């Protein structure tokens, strides 16, 4: 079958000779992909920053598809169902899944006890192949996949597998109270969605920080917020303090993660020399520009090894840090309502529709931020007919 094939850092290709997935467990399903996306998290893999990313793997943890085959243990899902598949692979039965911590399932990922499994996200996240392919194997098929509601646009559905729940959970973990000032670092798809969702929780002011002008322009309109380029601010932390009466923001959200720009020292130690798990510049800014007693919500991804963070400021300011992979399945019912009511319009962030055959080009455009790229989606040949 046709699928994305990882060949090493900055090298991916569309390969027509990838093996088709098979049912390996009675609770598996095989899904024929109708749409998949490239996520900022895939860029960490693409840039070679995630340990144990093996050559020959197919990435892609955001996808929709039609169920082609089900194992004998699958009870609810039926052949022919058009489903959206959360990026977390979760068993639904372990004590973490029972607490709805579907991103921290204890059964699906034998390689780690922190994160559960994620489609197409290296062997540190379970070693499962992902959905940037014609077909994908979906384990625990009765747990994750959800039939796409009749009236829902498939473009909205595919964004419900990751970007929308992640942005929403970023705002939710911020514990936003009515009138709060919320600062979102990062104007990628996740930061854009976090800014939009902050209003749903009653924010009084939403400020987004990035250095890519077209993304700042986009988020200003899409999320009706203020947006600033940190390159044109002398010091983003000082700016944020000044604009909040020297108190600091009530809530800061890190929607950047381990590839943050903006500090030479962090870039060299984190991204070039790999002395820490990527650069933590946005996290530093978040901790330093939130008010005393405030909340820092982290959805930007950091690796399994360590990062240097200003823990003294966390302690002395009495901060609460909340972080996780999004728990997609937990959030889906309410997010579907938000999309159906029009409060959220996810598909508006899709900037590129790319045939799966051109996956290499799509990675390049998204990674290099060419052509005003916000969110690329990949369409396999059978879904273009
Ligand atoms: N926790 C989760 O469940 C989850 C889910 C999806 C994505 N993520 C993570 O969220 C992060 C964002 O994902 P995305 O798809 O929006 O990625 P993206 O790469 O498109 O966006 C990141 C943005 O951050 C900006 N940026 C870089 N340095 C910055 C800084 N110092 N301050 C402010 N902005 C800065 C970049 O210019 C870019 O626009 C990634 O780390 C991704 O891995 C986490
Ligand atoms: Zn993702
Ligand atoms: Zn579980």
Image (cartoon, rainbow, N blue to C red):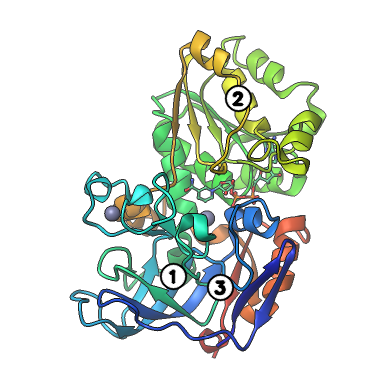
Q: Of callouts 2 and 3, which one flags the residue occurring earlier in the amino acid sequence?
A: 3
Quadrant of res 46: bottom right
Task: Please say if 75 is above or below 286.
Answer: below
Label at residue 309 = 2
Which of the pair 171/207 is nearer the observer? 171
x and y percentages locating residue 117 in the rendered image: 42, 57
Helix, strand or loop for disc 2: loop
User: Going from the N terminus, do you reach mark 3 or mark 1 first?
Assistant: 3
Q: What percent of the width, then of the height, locates residue 168?
A: 43, 44
Q: Residue at x 63, y 48 (%)?
A: 188
Q: Tell which of 74 and 340 is nearer to you.
A: 74
Number of residues whose C-alpha sits closer than 10 Å to that of mark 1, classed few (under 14), some (14–19) or many (20 or more): few
Picture residue at 39% right of the left edge, 28% below the top = 175
| Between marks 2 and 1 in the image, the one whose residue lies nearer the viewer | 2
**Element type where label 1 sits in the image:** loop
Find residue 338 and report its horizontal and vertical position in percent. 37, 52
Task: Indicate left or right for 283 with 210 as reference.
Answer: left
Q: Report which residue position mark 3 lands on.
A: 132
Per the image, the residue denoted by label 1 is 153
Q: Is residue 344 shown to the viewer in this render?
A: no
How many marks can you see? 3
The local secondary structure at tag 3 comes to loop
Identify the mark at residue 87; answer none if there is no mark. Answer: none
Residue 364 appears in view = yes
Decide: is 385 above or below 14.
below
Horizontally, is 3 left or right of 163 in the view? right
Mark 3–mark 1 CB contact (< 8 Å): no
Q: Please, is residue 91 above or below residue 150 in the view? A: above
Residue sitting at 39 percent across and 25 percent down? 178
Say if 72 sits above or below 148 in the image: below
Q: How far apart are labels 2 and 1 at the CA level?
A: 41 Å
Residue 125, x across and y down, in percent? 47, 56
């Amino acid at each position: 079958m046709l699928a994305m094939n990882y060949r090493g850092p900055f090298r991916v290709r569309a390969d027509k000779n990838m093996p088709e997935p098979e049912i390996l467990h009675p609770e598996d399903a095989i899904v024929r992909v109708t749409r998949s996306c490239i996520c900022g998290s895939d860029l960490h893999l693409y840039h070679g920053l995630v340990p144990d990313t093996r050559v020959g793997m197919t990435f892609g943890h955001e996808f929709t598809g039609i169920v082609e085959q089900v194992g004998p243990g699958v009870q609810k899902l039926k052949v022919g169902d058009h489903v959206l598949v959360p990026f977390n692979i979760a068993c639904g039965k372990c004590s973490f899944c029972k607490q709805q911590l579907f991103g921290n399932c204890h059964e699906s990922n034998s390689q780690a006890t922190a994160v559960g499994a994620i489609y197409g996200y290296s062997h540190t996240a379970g070693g499962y192949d992902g959905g940037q392919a014609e077909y994908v194997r979906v384990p625990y098929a009765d747990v994750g996949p959800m039939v796409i509601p009749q009236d829902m646009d498939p473009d909205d559905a595919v964004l419900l597998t990751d970007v929308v729940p992640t942005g929403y959970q970023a705002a939710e973990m911020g514990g936003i109270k009515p009138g709060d000032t919320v600062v979102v670092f990062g104007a990628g798809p996740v930061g854009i969605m976090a800014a939009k969702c902050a209003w749903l929780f009653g924010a009084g002011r939403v400020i987004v920080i990035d250095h890519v002008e077209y993304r700042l322009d986009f988020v200003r309109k899409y999320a009706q917020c203020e947006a600033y380029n940190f390159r044109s601010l002398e010091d983003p932390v000082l700016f944020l303090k000044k604009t909040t009466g020297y108190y600091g923001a009530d809530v800061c959200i890190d929607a950047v993660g381990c590839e943050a720009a903006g500090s030479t020292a962090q870039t060299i130690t984190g991204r070039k020399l790999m002395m820490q798990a990527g650069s933590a510049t946005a996290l530093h800014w978040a901790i330093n520009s939130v008010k005393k007693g405030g909340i820092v919500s982290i959805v930007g991804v950091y690796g399994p090894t360590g990062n240097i963070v200003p823990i003294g400021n966390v302690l002395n300011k009495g901060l609460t840090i909340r972080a996780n992979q999004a728990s997609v399945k937990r959030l889906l019912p309410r997010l579907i309502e938000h999309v159906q009511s029009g409060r959220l319009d996810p598909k508006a962030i899709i900037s590129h529709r790319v045939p799966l055959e051109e996956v290499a080009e799509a990675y390049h455009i998204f990674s290099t931020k060419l052509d005003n790229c916000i969110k690329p989606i990949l369409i396999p040949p059978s879904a273009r007919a």
